Amino acid sequence: MTPIDPLNPPLSGTRADLRPEHIRDAVIRLAGNSQDGIQSAGAMLARLAGRSAQDVMTYMTIPSTISGGASLFQVRVGTGEVLSPGDEADFLVAFYQHSYDENIGFLRQGGVLLYDSDHVEPDTEDKRFVHVGIPITGLTVEALGGTAKDKGKNIFVLGLLAKIFDLDVEKLKRLLNEKFGGKDESVLSTALMAFQAGYAYPVGNVLSTRYKFEPSEDTGGISQVTMDGNQALAYGLIAAGVRYGAAYPITPWTTVMEVLRAELPKYGGLFVQCEDEIGAVSMALGFSYSGNLAITGSSGPGISLKTEAIGWATMAEMPLIIVNVQRGGPSTGLPTNVEQSDLNQAIFGGHGDSPRVVLAPSTVEDCFYIALEAARIARSYSTPVFILSDASLATRIQAFDEPDLKNLVVEFRPNLTPREPGFQPYPLESLTQHAPPGTRMLGGVYPTVTGLEHDEMGHPTGSPRLHAAMTAKRRKKLQKLAAEIPAPEVYGESEGEALIVGWGSTYGPIHEAVKTARASGESLSALHLRHLNPLPNGLEKIFAKFRRIIVVEMNDQGLYGFGQLATILRARYCDPKISCLTKTNGLTFRVKEILEGVLK
Amino acid sequence: MTTASPIPDKLTKKDLTADHPTWCPGCGDFAVLSSFYKMLERRQLPHEAIVTLAGIGCSSRFPYFVNTHGGHFIHGRAVPLASGVSLARPDLHVFLFGGDGDAFSIGGNHLEHGARKNINLTYVIMDNFVYGLTKKQTSPTSPVGFKSKTDPNGAVDQPVNPMKKLVTAGATFVARSHATQVNHMISMMERAMDHPGFSVVEILSECVEFFPGAFDAGNPRKGGAFQLIDEKKFDGSPEDELRHDTTDEVAAYQLASLPFPGCFGVFYESDRPTKNALESLWVEKTQAKLGDTSALTLLQKTFDRMK
């Protein structure tokens, strides 16, 4: 017998045993426990789709416990636009009985249940589904040399799926190489063996169809990059020339700071893990004061701690980017679930009149671009800027067109040009642009930045006239910004029966709902806001063209029956036709829920 | 203020003076301010490279009275603010001023971590044993029995011992002075400034309004004793045996245990590397490995791996 090279095993198992069927879209749900590595298997599928110029979107839940507990990862791969991770799964891979029990309800009629027959006993009488039982645990243990451990089941399943979906094996092996190479060589060879065992399994004996994704339309030579929302945010900040930051770890924010801590030194910058949230925002303000626009971030509870210092940033007119990766609240709340309930906190969460800018990315791709927009605004208007992301964007993996870095990357240095005599840090008639320390003041007078109400030189004052004038100065710069940002485009017809207004991560399901409704002849459009404070000018003209405005958001309807953005829009436009659709179960909107909620 | 001459050849007190201090007449902080001017006059640092920062309190008004780049931050958080400035800008001299409330109460955790991280900055703590700005409440350094508006029967909580706290936290230059001893203050501030790392000078600075006479025991002109720390010279002489080794943590702790008013001078110093140096080293090594690469190229490479 010829010895087998473990790093390059021959591929046996022909595909002729499966009948091919061309598909454009598949939702695959992997359900297991949190230590099974289903996230990494799912992420590899997502990355493969991205490299094959297919659209992909993922959805995951992990328990907030340290180890153990049910975990799921859903990947939707499509030829063409994929807007949401899918309401129902076409394929369910169940590792355990509980995975089956809890997730079978999400499998569509006619869908395929792929289960580990070593652990799961499904109701095979249920003829709604195709049952495919494979002893995944036993085969993995056997393939990896008979150890009692079942690590590697995830990669076995990846091999199995590669066979069923006729995936590009070479590309997948390259991904395995990237993921496991560099470590101990045996780790990579084990992974490849597990993959090979899954791929070689004669799945044709139990499943009669193999599925093949239709090739993608020509992307015009633009390749795709695949990453999650927190990575996109971090790299967006780097592209924006942000080189300094400080934070404290908290789920689901943490991976942003992990990326920045590792990446910024390459760019000559620094990210510091601080003793607490207040220390972190204060250090970030120190970076900003030194002339380097800085970033701090957290999730709800941590943002609460930072609020006093953010008020200082408004008063001192210090630029700062504050990322809030929202989770369910209040208090410790639902650490690993999603909610959009920190909008009020972002806009109003400060004492005194403290206007600040609030932006929200709509997709993983937009996490990258919103970071550039936040940095631009923070620098031009010398103001704190919030980015409201959320738990679903943080971990969602998406493939998107590679950004045109040549035209986007910003190189930024503190402006230490000597300032002319008469320089004022807080001029009443123009925007503040600070002179960072190290700047020579040619008039010999050095500026003070301060949280006390101040005169134009930054010296404290209790003057009633100055407090009124300075309060107006801080407000007016946001009004100036409102005039500059364009109103977003309406998705669908620009007039009609109903307009959904959304913000943040609900972009996908809202747009898919509109697409579905319009296909069945309904008059439904959508408007998605990226700038939440200030709102862009001109929204009232868009609203005027619709009979109903429904604000779809993941927060509570509140004491008076309206979600957080709905309340703001009603206050802003005094328009009684503005209503809302809210939800607070910690899960993302399903397309069906939106359709049922808005088309009544 | 507006009469300051443009780009002076020599930095004088006149150039460094800004608003007239708002402190009460007789406040110890005036002497700290004039000592700071004198030290700056003596050292002739580039005017634009001096940064004066503070939190909240009477003493934290300091930046308004000094004509340098300055910032007045929120209560207790000036250490991390100043740390950000120091870490991002090695070209600057970062001076931080504040009181006992800022340093040992609301900002206690930040003081600990600034010290532990050994951030390169100079922190002058004007300790008056009372909250003066809010008109006489108990401070973290108020002695047991001190009667204030929040402790009408006398304070019951054990006060913070600043020297012990700073030594255990890992500050790498820890000194103590008295606002009536101008030359001593100047020399302590100067040594603190020259020390690379987290250098702190606690200055007993009397609040004449709410705790008059608090520090008379350390003021010879009021019948007290200003007992200086006799630092070891390492000259092998028998008298040197008895002198204080400023690099000895345990000896510093023992000195800090002396009954009030204790002694004055340098309690502890160490040449432990600063976070500034350690982080810069990491940046240099990382960049050296990458070669001369632009941000665009670096980011493009990262994105290529994500394709």
Image (cartoon, grey):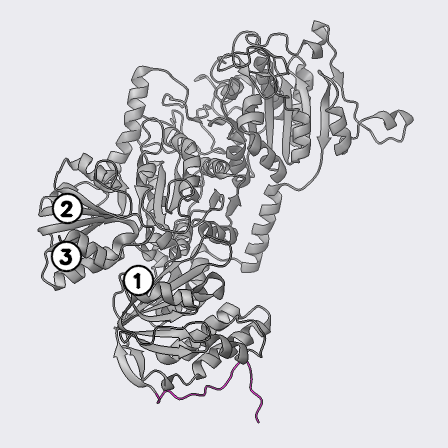
* Image disc number at residue A549: 2
Horizontal relation, residue A509 to residue B162: left or right: left
Q: Nearer the viewer, residue B82 or A178?
A: A178
Q: Nearer the viewer, mark 2 or mark 3?
A: 2
The amino acid pointed to by label 1 is Pro
The amino acid pointed to by label 3 is Gly
Q: Is residue A105 magenta?
A: no
Using the rendered image, report if marks 2 and 1 lie on a common chain: yes
Residue at the (48%, 72%) spot, across then down:
A153
Local secondary structure at mark 1: loop
Label 3 lies in what chain?
A
| Residue underneath mark 1 | A85
Residue at the (38%, 47%) spot, across then down:
A327
Residue A331: percent from the left, percent from the top?
Answer: 41, 40
| Residue underneath mark 3 | A492
Q: CA distance from mark 2 to mark 3?
A: 14 Å
Residue B264: percent from the left, percent from the top?
Answer: 72, 20
Q: Mark 2 or 1 closer to N-term?
A: 1
Q: Nearer the viewer, mark 3 or mark 1?
A: 1
